[in-house]
Image: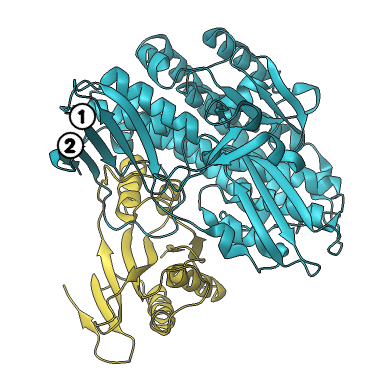
């Protein structure tokens, strides 16, 4: 199964760089049929890359409330036209819609969201994000070795607690 | 009662900004302001860091035009080392910048701006976007994606990463172009030429018909223009000297060095925006308004030095009647520049020096004060560093392309608003035209944090006492 893992975020904005950190770790694993992109932000030309694979992971950081037990969330994604927010920045669902509209190709897609607490200038990760990166790498590694569909909604705690899945 | 209309934030530009339109008692537009409401602080953030890190740090200001900062930072670093970089490195840096201009201009034209004029200002707002363009003209949309992908991959073939390639360094570059990279670039050139020629043909048809009004009212005013200029007056994007011309094409200042930028560029500030207001110092503020970027480069150069682009340049000037003073022609100039970049890349592919292993000069800290300049897709970019004996940065000043155009963007918005807006009731298509005035410049205000959901368009009519008398949100 051809897989594309896209990690994105600003590596100068603390925890925002989590997506790229995960992508680079996945690339270092040199998994068969897995291509990796490590990017500052999503851009339209990725639609052409997405159209060439069977499965795509979008790996990003998400602002997390400190009062909530931190988890890595993995959601199935469906294409959606985002009309008014199209700046230089693209959104994963838009890229899927572009792939479908222009290339008639819609791979299965997942959004891997890593909890982030600190998005100020800096190149270090908070402890929570550090833990989230490790969990995300392990999860994506496992999924890359799986041929079939992945549970469309997973919530994986960082402390080794119970994993939740929602259908 | 005078009122203020606020469009907040502007969509389809980089970063965060808003537009305020000030109405007089009769409901006519008195003035308009383009505000940048995001504070970046990169100049302070860099102090204390080694100058050798500047390419890597400043490239992360933005994911769209990082190469511009890489080049300006590396060129400033060259001066601190006081070295002459190898010729191969000069050519390789140029190649990367050509790829950068192509990808950035392709994004601006095909994805951000063309839906407005290809689908129509009055068309359904729900469809007046790149998705509408895909449905109406999928071949053009695919071509735009492939063209941007081409530019991005040129960068990747050189720097191993599409964005924030830490490949350009003080003294040169880290590695040459591989044979595989050269072959890939050559294989994609024919398709890229076809796409840009199709886009040019389409845009010129629109200029002859549907876009005549836009050319007249989208920021058509006299101003100075500034850009780098190469040998024999040829279009330049990486090195050369700085030239200013006026709207009649007269050379106002020539042969200027970036080292002396503080002699000819002043930097003013306004309390309502975080974006600086640079101006041509001899004329003072704000009379020293100038424009940079594709329109300025195309207006200033005597030619591109490549056959297809020079033929198009002649037609461009015939259409503009000499110097193009309409900001709407930024779109046209972008297409010309993409064509010129493709031709220059084609020429470079025949140069075996691109694969030379002699790509980097080394040295220590030999100068404590240095200024580097390059042409970013959006215009002239200055980096100014002061370092201590150990190469640690004591002071950093950046004049970015979008800042150079700040006065012109405000003037453009005002002109459009005065033409289209009469009274507090503002149809969506009119708002979109005002926004498009900003998109002509393709400003890059840089997003360094994530957008949270969709960016709405927020319009407020505010009485002098602060009362909101009208309010519209567009999602």
Q: Is residue A72 above or below residue B99?
A: below
Which of disc 2 and disc 1 is earlier in sequence?
1
The C terminus of chain B lies in which quarter of the figure? Answer: top left
Asked where in the image residue B228 lies, by quadrant, the reply is: top right
Chain shaded cyan: B
Q: Would you call the spot at circle 1 few (<14 residues within 10 Å), some (14-19), or many (20 or more)?
A: some
B21 horizontally vs B225: left or right: left
Tag shown at residue B52? none
Residue B172 in view, yes or no: no
Q: Which residue is mark 1?
A: B2
Are the residues flagged by discs 1 and 2 in contact, CB closer than 8 Å? yes
Q: Would you call the spot at circle 2 few (<14 residues within 10 Å), some (14-19), or many (20 or more)?
A: some
Q: Which residue is mark 2?
A: B463
Q: Please identify which colour was used for chain A in the image.
A: yellow
Q: Residue furthest left?
A: B469
Viewer-proximal residue among B329 and B125: B329
A1 horizontally vs B237: left or right: left
Q: Is residue B164 above or below residue B286?
A: below
């Amino acid at each position: 199964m051809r897989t594309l893992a896209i990690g994105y975020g600003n590596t100068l904005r603390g925890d925002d760089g989590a997506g790229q950190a995960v992508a680079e770790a996945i690339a270092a694993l040199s998994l068969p049929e897995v291509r990796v992109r490590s990017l500052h932000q999503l851009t339209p030309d990725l639609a052409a890359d997405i159209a060439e694979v069977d499965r795509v992971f979008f790996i990003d950081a998400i602002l997390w409330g400190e009062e909530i037990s931190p988890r890595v969330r993995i959601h199935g994604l469906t294409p959606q036209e985002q009309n008014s927010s199209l700046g230089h920045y693209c959104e994963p669902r838009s890229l899927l819609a572009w792939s479908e509209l222009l290339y008639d190709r819609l791979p299965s897609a997942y959004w891997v969201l890593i909890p982030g607490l600190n998005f100020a200038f800096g190149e270090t990760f908070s402890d929570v994000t550090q833990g989230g990166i490790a969990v995300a790498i392990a999860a994506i590694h496992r999924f890359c070795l799986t041929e079939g569909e992945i549970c469309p909604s997973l919530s994986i705690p960082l402390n080794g607690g119970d994993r939740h899945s929602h259908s | 009662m005078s009122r203020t209309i606020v469009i907040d934030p502007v969509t389809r530009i980089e970063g965060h900004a808003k537009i305020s339109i000030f109405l007089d008692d009769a409901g006519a537009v008195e003035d308009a302001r383009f505000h940048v409401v995001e504070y970046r602080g990169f100049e302070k953030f860099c102090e204390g860091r080694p100058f050798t890190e500047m390419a890597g740090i400043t490239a992360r200001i933005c994911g769209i035009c990082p190469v511009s900062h890489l080049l300006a930072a590396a060129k400033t670093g060259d001066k601190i080392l006081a070295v002459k970089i190898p010729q191969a490195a000069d050519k390789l840096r140029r190649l990367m910048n050509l790829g950068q201009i192509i990808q950035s201009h392709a994004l601006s034209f095909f994805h951000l701006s063309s839906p407005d004029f290809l689908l129509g200002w009055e068309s359904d707002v729900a469809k007046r976007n790149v998705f509408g363009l895909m449905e109406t003209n999928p071949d053009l949309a695919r071509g735009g994606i492939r063209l941007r992908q081409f530019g991005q991959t040129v960068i990747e073939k050189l720097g191993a990463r599409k964005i924030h390639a830490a490949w350009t360094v003080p003294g040169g570059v880290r590695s040459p172009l591989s044979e595989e990279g050269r072959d890939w670039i050559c294989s994609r050139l024919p398709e890229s030429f076809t796409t840009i020629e199709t886009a040019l043909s389409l845009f010129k048809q629109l200029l002859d018909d549907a876009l005549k009004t836009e050319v007249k009212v989208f920021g058509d005013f006299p101003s100075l223009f500034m850009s780098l200029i190469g040998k024999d007056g040829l279009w330049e994007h990486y090195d050369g000297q700085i030239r200013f011309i006026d709207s009649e094409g007269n050379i106002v200042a020539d042969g200027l060095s970036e080292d002396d930028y503080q002699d000819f560029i002043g930097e003013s500030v306004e309390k309502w925006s975080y974006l600086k207001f640079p101006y041509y110092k001899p004329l003072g503020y704000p009379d020293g308004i100038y424009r940079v970027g594709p329109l300025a480069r195309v207006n200033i150069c005597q030619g591109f030095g490549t056959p297809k682009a020079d033929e198009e340049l002649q037609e461009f000037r015939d259409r503009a009647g000499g110097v193009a003073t309409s900001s709407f022609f930024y779109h046209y100039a972008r297409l010309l520049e993409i064509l010129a970049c493709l031709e220059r890349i084609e020429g470079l592919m025949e140069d075996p020096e691109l694969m030379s292993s002699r790509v980097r000069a080394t040295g220590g800290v030999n100068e404590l004060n240095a200024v580097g300049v390059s042409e970013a897709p959006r215009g002239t970019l200055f980096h100014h560093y002061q370092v201590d004996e150990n190469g640690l940065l004591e002071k950093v000043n950046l004049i970015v392309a979008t800042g150079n155009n700040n006065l012109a963007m405000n003037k453009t918005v005002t002109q459009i608003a005065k033409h289209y807006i009469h009274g507090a009731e503002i149809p969506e298509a009119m708002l979109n035209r005002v926004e498009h005035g900003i998109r002509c410049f393709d400003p890059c205000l840089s997003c360094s944090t994530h957008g949270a959901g969709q960016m709405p368009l927020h319009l407020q009519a505010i009485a002098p006492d602060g009362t909101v008398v009208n309010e519209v949100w567009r999602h």
